[in-house]
């Protein structure tokens, strides 16, 4: 039977329904089902139909609005000026058309250039911050563009969000009476990977991309959860402003920086389109080296007077465009679907792929996350799939290419027995959980990853205990649990493959040196379900002793701010398991002495630090936690109460401000020295 082409209005109505649904999934639930590119395609098709048939246009079409209505659990905040969206350019040609339109409207003479500011398009969550007389009074999400959600307390937990604006120098413009500034909250790629790994271990649905993870992290009813996530803010545009005037967007950005607001270091002023296009090429080239995701370049007419003349059409300004990067996608074939076993015994399905180059990197595996994801995407062995790579995130399967399926391949089934050589333990799926687990606690794969976690930098920080070595220690039966590490002689290490005398000695020294860990690191190292670095700190501060943590009943745990029922249950379950109690006892017997945190009386007590620029030896999160552990405080902006500004590579305006206020500036070496004595 020939397929009937749906009448136009039917197609338009169905496109609107689809787009509305995806809007809800994207903005309301932070869980999109399609990629941005697929969404853009639907949206453009609807726009094209409406443009060709104006009689089909309606005021409630999604093309007339931005996003979905705000979730109900947060207080609604009305934006003084609507938060607009951006029109997209997919190719250079679209950007040239964008400039042509501008030239026509402005009636520019041939040869006269339009000046631009080119900024990376940050793939995060748009927010608006309102400062009154320099004080942060409210912060909200974009919501539907008109009304957003009040996330002030959550935004305040982000280190780079200043609670107060202060001029960096006498030459800086006065802080305005009222400043509404917009920006993007993003999650670093490393933070995204860590978060998803933790969620996979817990059998929770994973975030599809860093943007959703950032949104999910910011829209938390419990700000303690937001505080534990490595979020950052970059300001990029203005709302209503009282008490300051600018002539160009570039000046506006410069003023923001001088008031202590973070702006992106890759923003560039471009005198003409040719320069802007070169900047696009430069961004494409650096994209993969950035610690966060960008998905294009935003090109903005620099002169505000011209912006005003250009105005806006329905949902987007005519003076700006988002020149999107080509998605780093490729098609390939699934050779096999296998289960890989993680630290807590979780079996994660992984697609082994016919090797394919995506964005210059050869990809051989893609995560399928869990059985629900496989079922939703219906991925089977032999299928042709579209995979996507974002920055250095593990690639994932976007969808299958159904037309290319050959025959009726069998669905993937989780093995009933653990596939790890030497294990064969039972695989179970616990009630209400998406994850399958190998229940054999002695499973070599689990043991190996638990030991790697125990020795990792955020945990016991045992240098030299790498993957290959752990493999040997487990394979040769030298280590059955963490406590065994403290019993191995240097000579035994020296006898292992690829271990020189010197590295064996260094390793023994590192193991001995780890015997006085901070209590929070020790708790984190134990690998208790749900207890990440942040919650380990919370537990350590509240209970101050490992025995007290293990003895705490659920009620006592629940009284602790930041600990919810799930975490409380998990800590209890860990403590109630005789095997775990024996393990902790053996570690203490081996001479481990976890150290209680030293809050107000620590060596850095009473001192406030502001960090600017990148450090070579520590991440921002590590630096902050070292300061906090020594009793110090970390602030996002430089003020009279700042004790030290720590300046790494590429410091921002905070450094200038510190110099101006005569606040001591520490370089990385001086900072490490201070921490060393703390
Ligand atoms: S300017 C009217 N600049 O992209 C212009 N937006 O698709 C308003 N975005 O909602 C935004 N990076 O959340 C601007 N450098 C940048 C941006 C940026 C990311 C987001 C922003 C906006 C969305 C529009």
Image (cartoon, rainbow, N blue to C red):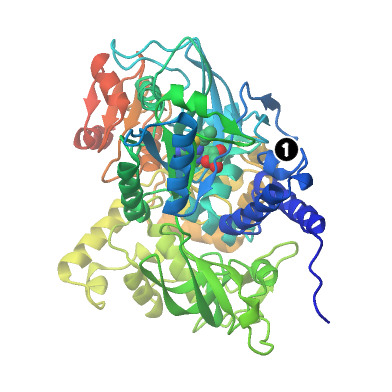
Q: Residue at x 39, y 66 (%)?
A: 484
Considering depth in this image, is 601 or 226 the residue closer to the camera?
Answer: 226
Residue 491: x, y in percent? 22, 72
Q: Residue at x 63, y 24 (%)?
A: 79
- Residue 203 in view in this figure: yes
Residue 306: x, y in percent? 45, 26
For the C terminus, which image quadrant? top left
Q: Which residue is mark 1?
A: 69
Q: Is residue 147 left or right of residue 110?
A: right
Q: Is residue 116 left or right of residue 503?
A: right
Residue 138: x, y in percent? 59, 22
Q: Secondary structure at mark 1?
A: loop
Considering depth in this image, is 153 or 343 the residue closer to the camera?
Answer: 153
For the N terminus, which image quadrant? bottom right
Quadrant for residue 356, please give it: bottom left
Considering depth in this image, is 444 or 232 the residue closer to the camera?
Answer: 232
- Residue 539 in view in this figure: no
Q: Is residue 378 above or below residue 245?
A: below
Considering depth in this image, is 511 or 197 the residue closer to the camera?
Answer: 197
Quadrant for residue 437, please give it: bottom right
Quadrant for residue 225, please give it: top right
Disc 1 under 8 Å from ligand 1? The reply is no
Q: Is residue 227 left or right of residue 600?
A: right
Q: Is residue 557 above or below residue 678?
A: below
Q: Is residue 322 above or below residue 73?
A: below
Q: Is residue 404 above or below residue 634?
A: below
Q: Residue at x 72, y 38 (%)?
A: 71
Q: Residue at x 54, y 31 (%)?
A: 155
Residue 339: x, y in percent? 56, 76
Q: Looking at this view, name the residue that lies furthest to the bottom.
A: 407
């Amino acid at each position: 039977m020939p397929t009937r082409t749906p009448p136009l209005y039917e197609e338009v109505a169905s496109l609107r329904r689809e787009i509305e649904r995806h809007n809800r999934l994207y903005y309301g639930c932070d869980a999109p089902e399609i990629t941005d590119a697929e969404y853009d395609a639907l949206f453009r098709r609807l726009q094209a139909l409406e443009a060709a048939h104006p009689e089909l246009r309606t005021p409630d079409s999604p093309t007339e609005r931005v996003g979905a209505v705000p979730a109900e659990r947060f207080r609604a905040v009305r934006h003084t000026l609507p938060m607009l969206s951006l029109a997209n350019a997919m190719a250079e040609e679209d950007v040239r058309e964008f400039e042509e339109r501008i030239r026509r409207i402005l009636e520019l003479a041939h040869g006269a250039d339009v000046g631009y500011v080119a900024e990376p398009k940050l793939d995060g969550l748009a927010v608006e911050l309102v400062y009154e007389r320099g004080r942060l009074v409210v912060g909200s999400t974009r919501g539907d563009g008109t009304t957003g959600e009040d996330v002030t307390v959550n935004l305040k937990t982000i280190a780079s969000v200043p609670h107060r604006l202060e001029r960096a120098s006498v030459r800086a413009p006065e802080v305005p009476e009222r400043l509404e500034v917009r920006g993007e909250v993003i999650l670093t790629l490393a933070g995204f990977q860590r978060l998803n790994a933790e969620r996979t271990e817990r059998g929770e649905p994973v975030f599809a991309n860093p943007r959703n993870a950032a949104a999910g992290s910011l829209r938390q009813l419990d700000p303690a959860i937001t505080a534990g996530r490595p979020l950052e803010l970059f300001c990029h545009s203005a709302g209503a402003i009282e008490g300051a005037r600018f002539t160009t967007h570039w000046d506006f950005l410069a003023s923001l920086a001088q008031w202590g607001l973070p702006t992106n270091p890759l923003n560039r002023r471009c005198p003409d389109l040719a320069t802007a296009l070169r900047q696009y090429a430069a961004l494409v080239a650096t994209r993969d080296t950035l610690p966060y995701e960008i998905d294009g370049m935003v090109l903005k007419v620099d002169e505000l007077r011209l912006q005003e003349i250009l105005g806006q059409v329905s949902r987007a300004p005519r003076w700006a465009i988002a020149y999107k990067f080509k998605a780093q996608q490729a098609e390939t074939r699934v050779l096999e679907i296998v289960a890989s076993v993680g630290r807590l015994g979780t079996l994660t399905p992984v697609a082994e792929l016919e090797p394919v180059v995506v964005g210059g990197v050869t990809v051989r595996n893609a995560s399928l996350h869990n059985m629900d994801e496989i079922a939703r995407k219906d991925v089977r062995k032999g299928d042709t799939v579209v995979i996507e790579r974002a920055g250095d995130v593990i690639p994932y399967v976007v969808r299958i290419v159904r037309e290319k399926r050959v025959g009726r391949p069998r669905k993937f089934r989780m093995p009933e027995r653990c596939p790890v050589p030497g294990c064969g333990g039972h695989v179970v799926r616990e009630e209400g959980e998406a994850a399958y687990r190998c229940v054999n606690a002695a499973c070599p794969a689990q043991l190996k990853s638990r030991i790697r976690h125990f020795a990792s930098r955020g945990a016991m920080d045992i240098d030299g205990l790498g993957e290959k070595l752990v493999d040997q220690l487990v394979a040769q039966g030298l280590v059955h649990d963490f406590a065994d590490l403290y019993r191995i002689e240097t000579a035994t290490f020296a006898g292992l493959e690829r271990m020189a005398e010197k590295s064996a000695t260094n390793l023994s020294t590192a193991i001995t040196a780890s015997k006085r860990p901070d209590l929070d690191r020790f708790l984190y190292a134990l690998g208790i379900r749900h207890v990440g670095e942040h919650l380990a700190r919370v537990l350590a501060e509240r209970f101050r002793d490992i025995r007290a943590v293990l003895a705490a009943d659920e009620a006592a745990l629940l009284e602790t701010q930041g600990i919810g029922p799930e975490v409380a249950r998990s800590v209890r379950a860990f403590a109630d398991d005789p095997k775990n109690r024996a393990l902790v006892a053996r570690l203490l017997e081996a001479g481990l002495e976890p150290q209680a945190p030293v809050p107000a009386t620590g060596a850095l007590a009473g001192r406030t630090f502001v960090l600017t620029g990148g450090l070579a030896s520590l991440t921002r999160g590590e630096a902050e936690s070292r300061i906090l552990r020594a009793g110090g405080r970390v602030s996002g902006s430089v003020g009279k109460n700042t004790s030290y500004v720590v300046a790494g590579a590429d410091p921002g305006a905070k450094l200038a401000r510190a110099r101006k206020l005569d606040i001591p500036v520490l370089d990385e070496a001086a900072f490490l020295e201070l921490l060393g004595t703390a």
